[in-house]
Image: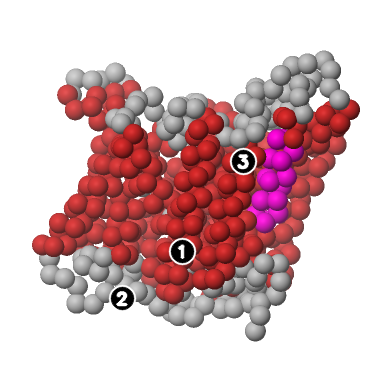
Amino acid sequence: MFHNLPTYSNLVILAYLTAMGAIGVLVSRWNRENSTTEYFLAGSNVGWFALGTSLFVTTLSAGWFLSLADVLPSRSDQVLWGGMLGALFVLVLGVFFAPRFLRSTVFTVPQLLSGRLDRTTWLSLSGLSIFLNVAVRIPLVIFWGSWVLGHALGWDMTTSALLIVVVTGLYTIAGGLSAVIYAQVIQAGIVVLGSLLLMLSSLGGPRSGSLLSGEGGSLFFLSSPAASGSTAPWPGLLLGILAVGTWYWFSDQYVVHRVLAAKNKKHALRGTILAAWLILLQIAVLGLIPLSTTESQSQSVFGTALDAVTKRIIPIAFLSLLMSSLSAFFHSTATLFTMDFYRSTHPGVDDSTLVLVGRLAITGIVVFAILIVSSIAIVGSDTTVHLRCVLTSLTPPIAAVFLLSLTWRRVVGKCALWALIAGELFGLTHLVAGAVLEKGDDTLPFVGAIAGAHDLFIAASAFAISAFVLVTLSFLREAPAMAKEPTPGERGSGTVDVLRSGFGARKV
């Protein structure tokens, strides 16, 4: 499987995978309440340190694996500005959105809008999020991660990806969100350590060979294919980044899930501040790493030893990013399905049944992910480009509906549904036009213009269309008699100590 690595490195990697799998077993034995709060929200007692490190490694893996590589003219600028915007977004999440989320005591982001929107609309938001996770985002992470496993690390893509998916699925199914966050605390430390070692090794002067076994270069985990070769004026690009960022940081269950599980708003704020600092630290560290290594026959003893350590840590750091992202997708998707759809159709169901449904949902997603792994060999390199284009085209309408419904009490539920449909149709038009143009059919006059537009410009336009439709239709309808936030009831309490405060027990 890891055929390009020495036996010692293989043993270290296998030990790491075994430790990750053991986390789920241990957490499942510690948490015997079998309650929905425990399984889906880690007992609502996630402390600031665990929350901050979990947010950091979650958003690092998805945000930089799947980054829009053509937004800025150079890779270093992309990392710099992307990271700075990420740090800003996560602070806004902690300061303005986290108190609202925690006050509503919800399990999912769509539930936050259930008191203002009709049932069809907020379930449509949840269903669209599930679809994007299962059909787009999980395959995207697996395809891109497999590409790095094969080309940058020289591993067997299918076998190694299959093992990673299975191990990640096992500890997520067994331990729920507590296991996911426990693992992410460890994974964040490995990622930071790997980045620091990579920086020191890169600053140590010429070396006798690449730090990686393949052709990926020392920044392999930041590289990604361009989403589009087209250009657009910078205001359009900026608005597109803001539209996609609003969806990702404030309305995406994948990210917000951790904030929903925070002990209280003080811990949520401190956790987001920690995540922002870790993101900025990562930018500073990676900014000192050259994009390529220099061949040389001479190197100091210290440099040789440092390279040897770095070569063993970097693969584990990448595995940490990949497993962190997959576990978050598995669990957040299962939470949306169980707590939004299953519970709403079975109002009297007990906690143990909901936990069982959640575990079965994760199992189904893992099986689907295994099928994706088996198709890696027949997937073209442009697949990730198309999948990322789907994300930038279809997610801004979710952000527009979420933001206006949360902040403007004049919103009418059915109008929000039509706004969502209008924005999604516009995004689908862009995707269809691109597919038609790719096949060489440019006879229709609008195909070239729509397909040639930059993805971020399409994102900004989709956001604006949804917002315009929602505001216009809401003014044409009678204002809601009462707008309120849902209160599904008190969540449970009690979880693993590391999740309760920084690294200490909850104060009573």
What is the distance, in whole Å, between disc 3 and disc 1 at their CAs?
24 Å
Res 55 → quadrant: bottom right
Question: For the view shown, which residue lies furthest in the left direction?
Answer: 476
Question: For the view shown, which residue lies furthest in the right direction?
Answer: 301
Residue 279 in sight from this viewpoint: yes
Q: 501 or 366, which lies in front?
A: 501
Neighbour class for label 3 at 10 Å: few (<14), some, many (≥20)?
some
Circle 1 sits on which residue? 95
Inspect the image, locate mark 1, and give the three-letter code of the amino acid beneath it. Answer: Val
- Closer to the eye: label 2 or 3: 3
Main secondary structure type of the part rendered in magenta: helix
Circle 3 sits on which residue? 284
What is the distance, in whole Å, between disc 2 and disc 3 at their CAs?
43 Å
Horizontal and vertical percent for residue 1? Answer: 73, 33
Q: Is residue 229 above or below residue 133?
A: above
Instruction: Please name the colour scheme applied to the rendered image.
Output: secondary structure
Q: Is residue 53 above or below residue 108?
A: above
Counting residues from the start of the chain, the first of labels 1 and 2 encountered is 1
Inspect the image, locate mark 3, and give the three-letter code of the amino acid beneath it. Answer: Ala
Q: Residue at left 46%, top 64%?
A: 95
Q: Residue at left 31%, top 72%?
A: 115
The answer to whether the residues at label 2 and label 3 have Cβ atoms under 8 Å apart is: no
Circle 2 sits on which residue? 484
What is the distance, in whole Å, between disc 1 and disc 2 at their CAs?
21 Å
- Is 286 left or right of 312, judged from the image as shown? left
